[in-house]
Image: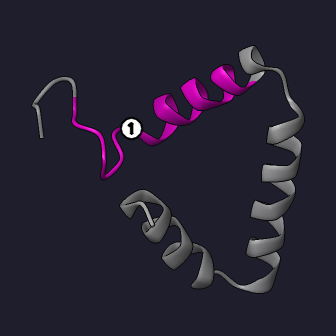
């Protein structure tokens, strides 16, 4: 199993029932969208959340 998937499953398993339901609903809705809509959502997440553990900061390189 990929390390990103392992991290995702660990965080998901630590959520309460309502939060897990919200994630499942988001995934179902996300997968129905066209590629361009998915890309917009991903870009929005990147802007609002900043670099994630697997990304590096474009400014400092960390």
Camera-nearest residue between 2 and 7: 2
Picture coordinates of residue 35, whole percent (x, y): 74, 19
Q: Give me the residue at 81% from left, 63% from top.
A: 24
Q: Quadrant of residue 51?
A: top left
Q: How busy is the neighbourhood of tag 1: few (under 14 within 10 Å), some, or many (20 plus)?
A: few
Query: How is this picture coloured?
Result: one colour
Picture coordinates of residue 12, whole percent (x, y): 61, 74
Q: Give me the residue at 82% from left, 78% from top.
A: 18
- The residue tagged 1 is 50
Q: Quadrant of residue 55?
A: top left
Magenta residues?
38-57
Picture coordinates of residue 2, whole percent (x, y): 42, 60
Camera-nearest residue between 46 and 27: 27
Q: Is residue 15 magenta?
A: no
Q: How many marks?
A: 1
Q: With 57 as the anchor, is 12 left or right in this view?
A: right
Q: With 58 as the anchor, is 41 left or right in this view?
A: right
Picture coordinates of residue 38, whole percent (x, y): 71, 27
Q: Predominant secondary structure in magenta? A: helix
Q: Is residue 36 above or below residue 51?
A: above
Q: With 60 as the anchor, is 53 left or right in this view?
A: right
Q: Which element is circle 1 on?
A: loop
Q: Is residue 55 magenta?
A: yes
The quarter of the image holding the N terminus is: bottom left
Q: Give me the residue at 73% from left, 14% from top.
A: 36
Q: Is residue 10 above or below residue 58?
A: below
Q: Give me the residue at 50% from left, 78% from top.
A: 10
Camera-nearest residue between 56 and 48: 56
Identify the residue at the far top of this view: 36
The quarter of the image holding the C terminus is: top left
């Amino acid at each position: 199993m990929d390390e990103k998937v392992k991290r995702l499953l660990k965080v998901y398993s630590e959520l309460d029932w309502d939060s897990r339901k919200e994630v499942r609903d988001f995934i179902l809705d996300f997968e129905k969208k066209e590629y361009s809509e998915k890309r917009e959502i991903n870009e929005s997440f990147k802007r609002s959340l900043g670099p994630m553990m697997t990304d590096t900061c474009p400014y400092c390189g960390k």
